[in-house]
Image (cartoon, helix red, strand yellow):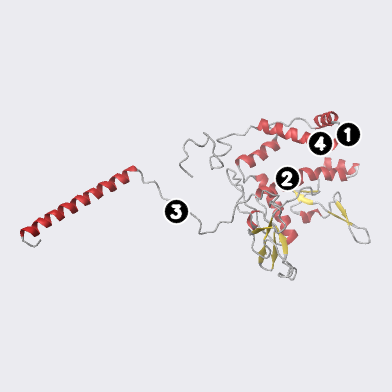
Amino acid sequence: LAGYDQTFAEKSFYNSHLDSNKTTPVSMESIAASATILARAAVASAYDNGDLDAETSAAYATNLIPDLDPTDESLMELANCLLTDGNCDLLLKHGKTEQQNSKQRTGVDLGLGVALGTPPNYYISVYDATNGQSFVQIGNAWYGAYTKDDKKYGEKNTDTFLVRASLLETGIYGLLNNYLGQGDAASEMEEADRTMMETSSLLTCSSTKDCSKASYCTVSSSDEDGSSSSSAVCAGNVCVCPRSHYHLALDESIEAVPNNSTGRYRVKDDDEGVSAMYTEPYWSSTVGVRVYRDAGDRTGTWALGAGLVVAIVAFASTWSLKNKLKKEKLY
């Protein structure tokens, strides 16, 4: 895009490579204050028992949650990942753990998701298998959706459902499990176990397969013996109770085309036009424009000059030849 001159606001970089924390620093004081307000609002909403006693709920939340320090170590580490270095160790740690968890669960290693880069780039790209779209693997083929009548799912051990979330998504997923799951693990423990957890630590892990003995996260079995098993997952190298989930980032009026490759969608038959259905169309590879460099004003001047010289030479040559032909009485 070019030719806008004074149309765009000054120092507004509009998601370009210059739109970074270095050129437009983010106020950590504002971020910390916003986080404090949001956390207190969540606690106050949960504390109210239906009496709509906002004053008591707000006072409880304020006393429970102190003001977040703008220089808090965890806040600064996360801010560095989101604003400066999208390939930071924090996101990589959780991303690699989720990679191992997914491999253990499905038997397929999809690798790490797309990284944010340095500086972070939040362009969402096309929603397909490499950018967060969930899909089904049947044999050696991937489908955004499938119908059982056409494709024979389950005939091979490799048939499974997969999702390759971005490094940002897997990182946040692991962070939420780590932060929220540790509190849930503590609430499931007996008092003696809580003391043990405070004095030592939760079970350590490299993937969820190491958390089978985490008794503080259990789910009841449907077997007749009434046995239970651990539901703990690995996040932040410790076994915690799962508390985060992926959600489909797709307008509710759009669905993946059955038995087609990922990245292809259609409007649902029962769509009533309620949704705004904002999306970018699927552009053909033949759609485009050819762009040339601006050669500057001198090129036109030289071209005009050369044209005049050729015209003058041609006129002079023609005039001279005509006179010679007349002299020889050939014209």
Q: Quadrant of residue 208?
A: bottom right
**Residue hosting label 2:** 175
**Residue hosting label 3:** 290
* Real-space Cα separation, disc 1 to disc 2, in angstroms: 34 Å
Q: Earlier in the sequence, mark 4 or mark 2?
A: 4
Instruction: Kindly identify the amino acid type of the residue bearing the numbered disc 2.
Output: Leu
**What kind of element bears circle 3?**
loop
Q: Position of residue 60 (x, y in %)?
A: 84, 31
* Real-space Cα separation, disc 4 to disc 2, in angstroms: 19 Å
Q: Earlier in the sequence, mark 3 or mark 4?
A: 4
Q: Earlier in the sequence, mark 4 or mark 1?
A: 4
Mark 3 vs 1: CB contact within 8 A: no
Q: Which mark is residue 43?
A: 4
Work out which quarter of the rendered image holds the C terminus and state it.
bottom left
Q: Position of residue 323 (x, y in %)?
A: 9, 56
Mark 2 vs 3: CB contact within 8 A: no
Q: In the displayed image of the protein, which residue is found farthest to the right?
A: 225
Q: Position of residue 265 (x, y in %)?
A: 65, 58
**Residue hosting label 1:** 51
